[in-house]
Image (spheres, rainbow, N blue to C red):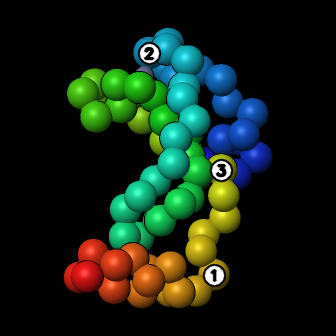
Amino acid sequence: MTLQEAWDATHCKCPLPVEEQVSWTLDNPGRRFKACPIYDENEKCNFYGFLDPELPTDYYRVQISLFQLA
Ligand SMILES: [Zn+2]
């Protein structure tokens, strides 16, 4: 899925409306994405698309790992 396809998407296949969320994983801190609200529970749901481009550097990852150690 391209970023534009994720921006344009409104519904999953299941067919719930997709929700805009923010990822706070170490790999994608602060990165916005859209996903089906039951993506984790329904294996038929495969809607998961990032709205922001990949982080260009590891800067945020390093900051977050430092924060978690503190
Ligand atoms: Zn779904």
Q: Mark 1 falls on what kind of element?
A: loop
Considering only vertical position in the picture, is 19 above or below 70? above
Amino acid type of the residue tagged 2 in the rendering? Cys
Residue 56's disc number: 1
Q: Residue at x 63, y 81 (%)?
A: 56
Q: Residue at x 25, y 82 (%)?
A: 70
Q: Residue 6 appears at what percent x and percent y?
A: 66, 41
User: Which is nearer the eye, 21 or 3?
Assistant: 21
Q: Residue 64 appears at what percent x and percent y?
A: 39, 77
Amino acid type of the residue tagged 1 in the rendering? Pro
Whether the residue carrying mark 2 lies under 8 Å from ligand 1 is answered with: yes
Disc with the residue nearer the chain's start (3 vs 1): 3
Q: Residue 48 appears at what percent x and percent y?
A: 49, 41
Mark 2 lies on residue: 14
Q: Quadrant of ligand 1?
A: top left
Q: Mark 2 falls on what kind of element?
A: loop
Considering only vertical position in the picture, is 18 above or below 15? below
37 relative to 33 in the view: left or right: left
